[in-house]
Image (cartoon, rainbow, N blue to C red):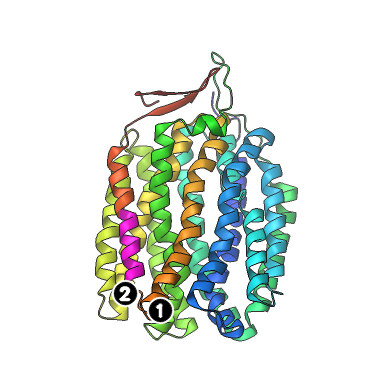
């Protein structure tokens, strides 16, 4: 039956989730910009910078399936509240880091705190929206991360320029705690899960999720896409400053252009997925990956800042198209009672990419005497993986029943 929530409550839940994702994005990308002054203050090499960034993703990845399973079991509200408070406190602590090792420790704990939010927010969508609206709802959440990137890069760069990186982290942490108070008062998804009276549905375990081929395909696809997302997020600010000779504020302003176009691509993806691409989602994954591959090749050889922005914009649009489709498919084809567990598995692939990409790219940059070309070719290779696996996806609906997860060839 349809999700029992009215339009007003849907809007409230969506607004709060988007606010959470924006703050989440602020806190997550802050380190990518702050490492520029941090590396100077602590004397860090490119490899050490990569380790600082990747330490977050290691714990963040571990928490994805755990957070999803907890949200399936206890509901999204409790898990989200814990995550929001924990990551806000750890953001404040990042601002008092005094060494390379303290940064590693705080970022690792920060990943534990923030890691449950993505999967739990997926459960909130299932608790609030019917299947035919979930692609658009998910695209709005993903768009909010782009908004966070657009605003955050410029605001964070400006805050660091005027007040230093330590003060910036403290302010962001307190912003998260204020949002937690708002969540405590207003965030309460009360919709019933999308179940039928004819079938008693059992939540699938993480072990059962690992047996579903479609989830493995989506996990690998998301891994490849996320290599690009996290690799670019970690090293693009440094590339723009060190290679393209931009100051911090100019870098933040120009970086917002590809993010804005990626945001538009995400919103378009959600609309077209709900309206026209039911059962044909894989073609958007393939098309988006192909756009990213071609654009990344031209980006490497961009002759000027203008072309860097143009090709970077096409990369963002292609990746956004593939990413939105990949993360929407569990919402449409996994039974609502098991969305947290299933999406936790898919998110795990993406966050493992976050562990690998920043450190490996940092190592490549250091090995090639400051050249970023090898790192960008690595990103192309990752998109090729997503493209090839996307070609193998079949149109499937995953249904949780009394025994386990079954796969049928009919799309609901």
Position in image of residue 368 (x %, y %): 35, 77
Depth order, front residue of 369/8: 369
Position in image of residue 233 (x %, y %): 46, 66
Residues in magenta?
373-383
Badge 1 local density, few (<14 within 10 Å), some, or many (20+)? Answer: many
What residue is rendered at 46% in x and 55% in y?
353
Position in image of residue 259 (x %, y %): 42, 65
Q: Is any part of residue 145 visible from this angle?
A: yes
Res 91 quadrant in image: bottom right
Q: Residue furthest top?
A: 198
Residue 80 vs 253, above or below: the answer is: above
Assess whether residue 376 is covered by the magenta stretch: yes
Left or right of 234: which side holds 193?
right
Dot label at residue 397? none
Q: Is any part of residue 318 visible from this angle?
A: no
What residue is rendered at 60% in x and 79% in y?
159
Q: Which residue is mark 1?
A: 240
Res 274 quadrant in image: top left
What residue is rendered at 36% in x and 68% in y?
375
Specify the quadrant that holds the N terminus: top right
Circles 1 and 2, Cβ within 8 Å, touching? The answer is: yes
Q: State whether the magenta stretch is mostly helix, strand or loop.
A: helix
Position in image of residue 127 (x %, y %): 59, 35
Q: Residue furthest front?
A: 367
- State how far apart marks 1 and 2 are (Cα): 9 Å
Q: Which residue is mark 2?
A: 308
Say whether disc 1 or disc 2 marks the residue closer to the N-terminus.
Answer: 1
Residue 164 vs 67, above or below: the answer is: below
């Amino acid at each position: 039956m349809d999700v029992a929530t009215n339009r007003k409550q849907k809007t409230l839940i969506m607004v709060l989730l988007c606010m959470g994702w924006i703050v989440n994005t602020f806190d997550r990308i802050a380190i990518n910009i702050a490492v520029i002054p941090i590396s100077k203050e602590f004397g860090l090499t490119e490899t050490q910078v990569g380790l600082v960034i990747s330490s977050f993703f290691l714990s963040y990845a571990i928490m994805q399936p755990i957070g999803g399973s907890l949200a399936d079991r206890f509901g999204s509200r409790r898990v989200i509240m814990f995550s929001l408070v924990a990551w806000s406190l750890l953001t404040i602590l990042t601002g008092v880091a005094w060494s390379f090792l303290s940064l590693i420790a705080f970022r690792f704990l920060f990943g534990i705190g923030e890691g449950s939010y993505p999967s739990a927010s997926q459960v909130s969508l299932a608790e609030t929206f019917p299947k035919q609206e979930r692609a658009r709802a998910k695209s709005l959440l993903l768009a909010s991360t782009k908004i966070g990137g657009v605003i955050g890069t410029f605001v964070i760069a400006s805050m660091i320029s005027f007040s230093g990186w330590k003060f910036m982290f403290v302010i962001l942490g307190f912003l998260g705690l204020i949002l937690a108070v708002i969540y405590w008062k207003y965030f309460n998804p009360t919709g019933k899960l999308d179940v039928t009276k004819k079938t008693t549905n059992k939540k699938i375990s993480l072990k059962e999720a690992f047996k579903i081929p479609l989830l493995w395909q989506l996990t690998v696809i998301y891994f490849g896409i996320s290599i690009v997302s996290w690799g670019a997020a970690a090293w693009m600010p440094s590339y723009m400053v060190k290679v393209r000779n931009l100051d911090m504020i100019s870098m933040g302003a120009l970086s917002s252009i590809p993010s804005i176009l990626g945001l538009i691509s995400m919103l378009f993806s959600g609309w077209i997925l709900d309206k026209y691409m039911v059962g044909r989602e894989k073609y958007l994954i393939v098309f988006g990956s192909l756009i990213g591959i071609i654009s990344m090749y031209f980006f490497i050889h961009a002759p000027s800042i203008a072309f860097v922005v143009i090709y970077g914009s096409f990369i963002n649009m292609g990746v956004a198209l593939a990413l939105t489709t990949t993360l929407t498919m569990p919402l449409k084809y996994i039974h609502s009672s098991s969305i947290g567990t299933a999406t936790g598995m898919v998110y795990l692939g993406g966050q493992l990419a976050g562990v690998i990409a920043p450190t490996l790219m940092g190592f490549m940059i250091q090995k090639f005497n400051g050249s970023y070309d090898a790192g960008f070719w690595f990103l192309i290779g990752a998109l090729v993986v997503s493209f090839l696996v996307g070609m193998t996806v079949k149109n499937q609906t995953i249904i949780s029943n009394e025994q386990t997860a079954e796969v049928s060839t009919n799309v609901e």
